[in-house]
Image: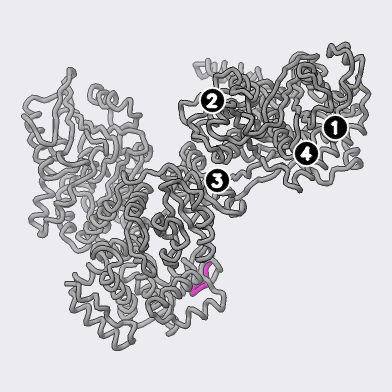
Amino acid sequence: MDYQHWKIERDNDDICWLHLDVADSSTNVLSAAVLDELSEILNEQAQSLPRGIVFVSNKKSGFIAGADINEFTRVDNYDDAIAMINRGHEVMDKIESLPCVTVAMIKGFCLGGGMELALACRYRVMCDDRATRVGLPEVKLGIHPGYGGTVRSILKAGPMAAMNAMLTGRLLQGRAAKRMGLVDDLVPERQLLSAARYFVLKRPHQRPLALKDRIMNHRLLRPIVAKQMRKQVAKKARKEHYPAPYKLIDLWQKYMDRPRLMLKKEAESVAELVTDYTARNLVRVFFLQEKLKSQGNKKDFQPQHIHVIGGGIMGGDIAAWCALRGFRVTVQDREPKVLAATMKRSMDMFKKKFKKDKAAIRDAMDRLIADHKGLGVPHADLIIEAIFEDKDVKQSLYKNIEPQMKDGAILATNTSSIPLEELASCLQNPGRLVGIHFFNPVALMPLVEIVRGDNTDDAVIKQALAFGRQIDKLPLAVKSSPGFLVNRILMPYLLEAVEMVGENIPPEMIDKAALNFGMPMGPIELADTVGLDVCHSVAHILSEAMDIELPKKMDFMMEQKKLGKKSGEGFYKWQKGKPVKNKDAHYGNLKELEDRLIFRLLNEATACLREQVVDDKELVDAGIIFGTGFAPFRGGPLHHIESEGVQLMLDRLNQLHQTYGDRFQPDSGWQQLS
Amino acid sequence: MKPRDVFIVDGSRSPFLKARGKQGPFSASDLAVACGKPLLLRQKFSLDLIDEVIIGSVMPAAHETNIARVIALRLGLAEHIPAWTVQRNCASGLQALDCAYHNIHSGKAQLILAGGVDTMSRAPVMLNDLMVNWMGRMMAAKSLPQKLQTVAQLRPAYFKPIIALLCGLSDPIYGLSMGQTAENIAYRFGISREQMDAFAVASHQRLMDAQDNGRLDEIEPIYDGKGHYYDHDDGLRRDSSMPNLAKLKPYFDKKYGKVTAANSAQITDGAALLVLASGAAVKKYDLPVLARISDSQWAGLDPREMGLGPAYAMAPIMQRKKLKIEDIDFWEINEAFAGQVLGCIEAWKDESYCREFLGLKAPLGEIPHDKLNVDGGGISLGHPVGASGARIVLHLAKTLHRNNAGRGMASLCIGGGQGGAMLIEAATEAEA
């Protein structure tokens, strides 16, 4: 019989190779259709049982990327959800209960539902290349594994390792996966087929769970361990914002003694989560991320050499990041002393990224060239300028390098405050100047703003967006208006926080109010971290353009030379890289503080929509989530307004307007929301 | 000029970093890659056009076998470009240039990246034969009693390491240390301790002057990824003086000798790389030109006086090209030992030596000290054996260029009793 997504092949050893090649898709996902076909195939194979079944992917992109997330969005009630989950469970159970050997041959990504399928097999063999990763990242979508992955991963890897992997959702490289016991063997690509065949023919003994894992799994110990786990999770995510990890811990604590029952409870738990507010918004964020990815097409630009001017923290980290992503990079600064610091930061980044892979670290360092003479300029396909914010200095630099630049090479500036049009005016070919605005710290912030000046060529914008994808960032095209999108929206929120400090509200309470809303870091701590001098200068430029009044507290801090983390004191005192917070700080109405902070941000977001700083509503939300960390479970500021009810929110804003004055004047952009 | 003429187009080197009793901050390939990266960035031709990479190296680390290939790949050169490593002890770097010179001259190649590197501070420390054999027995022992028996055979002497650096600096035939060969030369020509020390002081003064007046622009700064950078030869002693040097005790012939650590070359890490091109390539890719290589020569002599090698290697070139001493504007004779360089000068002045050993009818005359090693040498900036030959040729080419001078001679003595020399001449792009 012919199938749409699967190809069946039986070889001379009577091994059945099940090739998954999902039709009309570049990646394999376990959609309903794929699972239904698999179910039929397994029935058919059970009729004349092969010696073993090996699951193989025919996609270059990987094994199986997971369940079909699109299907999640179509489920809006518990009954449909549990039906969807149960269908997956049935197929996995069927794989597990086959009387013949089953092997998953994993090359490339094997995530979520794909990993759960692999875990339902008797054996897993994994390719040892860098692109192959396994993991159960469901928690990032506000759910937990739902095709039996909770039970089966714990049975294979033990509760500590498996729960850690599921609670963090992190992806595992081969060595980690093998060490945990999630895969049975790790082999080079050339031995993958032989290894799969070996497991079918030899059926080696399976490693039993280690004694310590069995102890941890004991029902008397589980409540204690679970308590610790909850404590750890609470540091990263609050239960009221992110229920999934807590439900996962409950599941293990209550049902681990009865795996069959735990499977059933897992399905129920996921069915509840999938229709919940958090999961819906996190799935939305997932699609927003996909949308940002689709902004740039890697094929539009394939640079060989990137030249970064400015070896400071931004320039240096941009250069290091590009080298990390495989590009040949020259980083220019006049001072070898500065470059020495740049190379150290780069080395630290590579070590963090590549861990013990010394060859990878060496290769990245070899790709990164400290260039105090600017020899890289004529070789570069893209030059990124990241020197200090001074129009005249930038212009004289541009005038100097433009004649040396290759034909067709792009000049990008990381400026966050000087209008592109002013900078471009000194160029022979102003169309080649584009803004590529990175956020600090470069290695952690996923967003880059691609700034379109009045003169910027369309082709150059396209190439800059492609470059964003080439370095594995999320590129967002923005208009060249003051503050672009992210800084502009962040600024009123930060200024409101500073205003509150001026009203003698304890900074600890201001930060707490923001955390209550779901921000990853409070505004005061953020301002201290970024540096008050940086905030001050950005605020100044923005205030001129946007007619915002700057809090007096800001100038006062500057006069006192309290610049935040870098000077040891800002709004907080900083010790060993951490702010010293007063545990006794108190303020009565935290909700009021939360609203003051958040509504200024929301109001500015509507202004950006109205002014079309980015193309549409979704991109406003995407930019703010990935650029500022704005509470992801709320799905973005504009989405938040709409899901709470536009009129209700506007009423509250009007209230704030009456109480606190014109900085809460609703923008006319609110009318575009529904 | 002809298409097969060989030109030095460009070159860079690392700072030479003195070994300070522990492994230096960079591996040999690190040093070569660090100076090679800016060198290649300066080139106008497509790097895929490079025909081969040739590197001289005496003591590459165990994980850097055929270090030339390691360097080529780490520099990002295409996989199709072959790379090979040459070894002629102290002149390995010169050997690499000579191989490149011949391959371009014969028409086999147009563009070659050649040079030398050594990290003396990282010379291997090896197990001795007793230990190696014991380990073999241990591996062969199967049962526990056998193993215990073998363990019981372990003796303190088994742990005595072999220091590869010391072996490398001893003559394998006569067992003399290189310093002792310099004592032999001093003995033959009656060179005094004071002459040697004065030569050493001058070496430091010249290097100091070169550093202070920017005559070492071939040095590229190197970064260690730990926040440090190195941008100059750190073996320079600015306080070097006759009274200071007089305090040192003889190092090789203890008590009665003349050769001290201060009038010998330093133990140093370093790398130097050059781009050599055919006349045709210079023309085709419009390359700048530093100098033209016009001749080279290798010679053998008594290993016990290996330091006189330059006298033997330079003489045939002088004869072939019918040159007198005053026809050479600048000389670079590698400073392995002050006594050995002074010995070469004496040999050329000595009528009977010239006749008996160099087969010359008349002495060649005196190489003027003010044209010899004008910016310092091995004594002040160190002698990373594989790199020195490439360094002196590069610096000589730069010196000719800077002074609009006509001819320069570079030469090294070679442990084991050899000498190598290369004659280069001023050239311009128009010639090619």
Where residue A625 appears, as percent x and y from the top left, is: 31, 62
In the shown orientation, is residue A182 left or right of residue B166?
A: left
Q: CA distance from mark 1 to mark 4?
A: 22 Å
Q: Name the element at disc 3.
A: loop
Q: Mark 2 or mark 1: which is in front?
A: 2
Where residue A152 appears, as percent x and y from the top left, is: 23, 42
Instruction: Report whether mark 1 lies on the same chain as mark 3.
Output: no
Q: Which residue corresponds to mark 1?
A: B260
Label 4 crowd bin: few (<14), some (14–19), many (20+), radius 10 Å: many
Q: CA distance from mark 3 to mark 4?
A: 27 Å
Instruction: Report whether mark 4 lies on the same chain as mark 2.
Output: yes
Where residue B246 appears, as percent x and y from the top left, is: 91, 38
Q: Chain of mark 1?
A: B
In terms of image quadrants, where is residue A148? top left
| Count of residue discs | 4
Q: Name the element at disc 2.
A: strand
Q: Mark 1 or mark 4: which is in front?
A: 4
Q: Chain of mark 3?
A: A
Q: Which mark is residue B375?
A: 4
Tag 3 near tag 2, CB within 8 Å? no
Mark 1 belongs to which amino acid? Answer: Thr
Label 3 crowd bin: few (<14), some (14–19), many (20+), radius 10 Å: many
Of the residues under marks 4 and 2, which one precedes in the sequence?
Answer: 2
Q: Of all residues shown, which one is farthest toward the bottom? A: A658
Q: CA distance from mark 4 to mark 2?
A: 31 Å
Q: Which residue corresponds to mark 2?
A: B52
Magenta stretch: give its range.
A570-576
Q: Chain of mark 4?
A: B
Residue A247 appears anywhere in the view: no
Tag 4 near tag 2, CB within 8 Å? no
Mark 4 belongs to which amino acid? Answer: Asp
Q: Which residue corresponds to mark 3?
A: A375
